[in-house]
Amino acid sequence: MVAFLVLFTSSLVNQMSLHLATYFWKIDATWTPRLLIAGIAGSLLAMAFAPAFTRAVGSRKAMMTGLCGFFLIQACAIIFPLAGLAPAAGTAAIGAFIFLCRFAAGACYALYVVPFNIVTYDIGDEHEANTGRPAQGIVASFMFIGLQVGSGVVALLAGSFLGLIDFPAQLPVDQMPAAKVAALAWFILSLIVIAGGAMAWLVGTFKSGRRPA
């Protein structure tokens, strides 16, 4: 359930970020591949340190730290421009700012993913120890199904969410009303805040008798 919800939310935010990049941040198209790479690079770098971080603070705290950091940085990428604390839209500076946000968010995501996998497979091991029946394959299957369903649901619902705020995505950038752009930013920010709180609460309920966190 957590894997599904986290992937659903992050995929939804990524889908909506395409509209933010076009209408809100007004990032030049040359930044698109850099922004795609930024999150991956941050995750790859953080994965090298995630096991040591998990051992130092415990699995549950590592997951909550990673998740809260991931959603907080995603929120800051919207809050700072709304508050006038970020570079102006349409400049190279805003592209660099979003690149750094994506990189940091990717690093935080890795700090969540590594301990999350440790805990979920510990649950499978604990089930086998208690019942004598292996469950690791079932755990892996449900995780895989959750990830695939999350991606599919996002693809189906992304347009529907834009419809909720009556966002005219077909309009050119220079004709888009400022009020609609602000509504898009606030809508996505609300999703991030609600989802981030829900994810932190769910992760806080994780328990494993083999590796208490």
Image: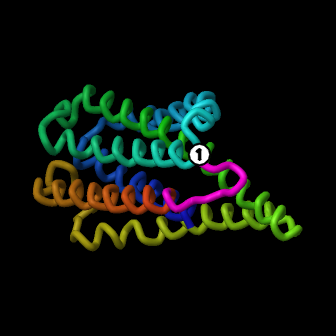
Write down the region rendered in magenta.
204-213
Q: Residues within 10 Å of mark 1 (few under 14, many from 20)?
A: many
State left or right for residue 176 relative to residue 152.
left
Which residue is pictured at 65% across the width and 52% down the height? Answer: 119
Please tell me in which quadrant of the rendered image residue 115 appears: top right
Name the residue: 42% across, 34% down.
104
The N terminus: image quadrant: bottom right
* Residue visible at 68% across and 61% down in the picture: 144
User: Does residue 151 appear in this view?
Assistant: no
Query: At which x and y percent is residue 75?
Result: 30, 47
Q: How many marks?
A: 1
Query: What secondary structure characterizes most of the magenta part?
Result: loop
Mark 1, secondary structure of its residue: helix
User: Looking at this view, is 129 or 175 the one in front?
Assistant: 129
Q: Is residue 210 magenta?
A: yes
Residue hosting label 1:
59
The residue under the point 19% across, 40% down is: 81
Tell me the quarter of the picture where residue 187 sits.
bottom left
Relative vertical location of residue 24 with respect to residue 142 in this rendering, above or below: above
Report x, y in % for residue 142: 69, 67
Q: Nearer the viewer, residue 65 or 147?
A: 65
Q: In this view of the protein, which residue sits in the foreground, 63 or 9?
A: 63
Please state if 27 lies on the left or on the right of 151 as rendered.
Answer: left
Depicted 203 relative to depicted 101: above or below: below
